[in-house]
Amino acid sequence: MSDVTIIGGGIIGICTAIALQNEGFSVELVDRGIATEGASYGNCGLLAVGEVVPISKPGVITKIPKWLLDPESPLFVRPREMITQMPWLLRFLWSGRRKRVLEIAKAMAPLTHRAEDDYKALFAQVGISDNLVPAENIMAFNSKADYEADQFSWDLRRQHGFNHRFLTGEELRSLEPALDGPISCGVLLEGWLQFSDPGLVQQRLTKFYVSRGGKLRTASVERIETDGKKAVAVHLAGGERLQVRRLAICAGAWSGKLARNLRIKVPIAALQGYHHHLPNPGVTLNRAVLYANGGFVLTPMESGLRIGGTIEVAGVDPRPNFERANIIARKAVGILPGLDISGGQQWMGPRPFMPDTLPVIDRAPNHDNVVLAFGHGQVGMTLGATTGRIVSDLIAGRTPGLDLSPYRSTRF
């Protein structure tokens, strides 16, 4: 047996594994094995330090009816999921009350404030410092009125130390000459950076982990076996039983089922995201651009240009609806004249969302040797290194340097 077994090899799991190795623990990481299925591979690659305002917030509820009826909207619920996911959706909307949003932002800020420093330390150790790109992101708008319509969010970000600078159309195009179309202004998101390519980052971290003696087992975990207040084994697909000393659940959208084995009911949902990746886009961007009016992100990466976005409520393992990826690709042509979307690679994967968009980072309430780390939603890539360090503190028996009560598994 290894000292610690980690379920889930996405960005949270691999950062946790390396942090635990740094503490002197032997580690075994158990993962489903199809790296391109997970959110860590397919995300937009942003170090979104200022993403402290939840998706559900004042004003969102009035937009829901239109979104539900429009298949091209940023949020879409497949009709068959309307009933099965209704409890989650109601909790999601209830979390959008002004008072609760203020609490959520206050809870998210201590995590994202640490993100850049934690990644810089990790990447320096691994020897991939150039995989964090020093180019602050831009959010682009069709009009200044569109920017001002969400003043509540901008003020809340600034209140927690995440600043931005308004850009006129001329200033925006001096930074990104390729942008055109209806865009008339934007903001420079100060402190927001990007990764060279999230899939490649994850591969390089995994290679480093294995080079230090880390074990990597390809298997799906069917259930967790317990004995009193201890998890004693995980049962793998195919019938294998793997004994464990300590266990970390970092399985993203698949974590809810495992948590139920430990008598923990967490309302986690798999919200599908899509991307359209262009190896040869034919145009050049200098940094990531979030197009607010289009509901997507354009990120230049090592492997090409990624057009990512949308949120689809469709369950954990649905059949992909790649028209969602085609929609954002066609929209991108409208702001990037000359963009070649032929030969693009489409992807769909599940983002693990809690209704309040805060992650679960907690000791399991009923089992002394289990730590939970999942449900990071749209900031999983951003919080990978930070979460890994917190989990290693918990497993090493230390108290992390921040209050973890907002992220407890029993908050609902």
Image: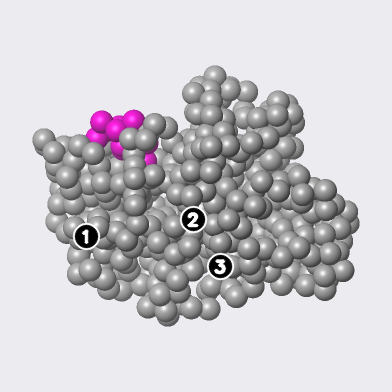
Q: Position of residue 12 (x, y in %)?
A: 40, 56
Q: Which residues are magenta?
A: 255-265
Tell me the crowding category of disc 2: few under 14, some 14 to 19, or many 20 or more residues within 10 angstroms, Cα based: some
Residue identified by numbered label 2: 109
Which quadrant is the C terminus positioned in?
top left
Q: Position of residue 231 (x, y in %)?
A: 17, 42
Residue type at mark 3: give it. Phe
| 133 to the left or right of 147 | left
Callout 2: SS: helix
Residue identified by numbered label 3: 195
Of the numbered discs in the image, which one, if any, rests on residue 398? 1
When the figure is inspected, residue 126 is found, relative to residue 260, above or below; the finding is below
| Residue at position x 46%, y 77% in the image | 128
Residue 376 inside the magenta-drawn segment: no
| 141 to the left or right of 45 | right
Callout 1: SS: loop
User: Disc 1 versus disc 3: distance between alpha carbons?
Assistant: 30 Å
User: Disc 1 versus disc 2: distance between alpha carbons?
Assistant: 22 Å
| Residue at position x 65%, y 30% in the image | 61
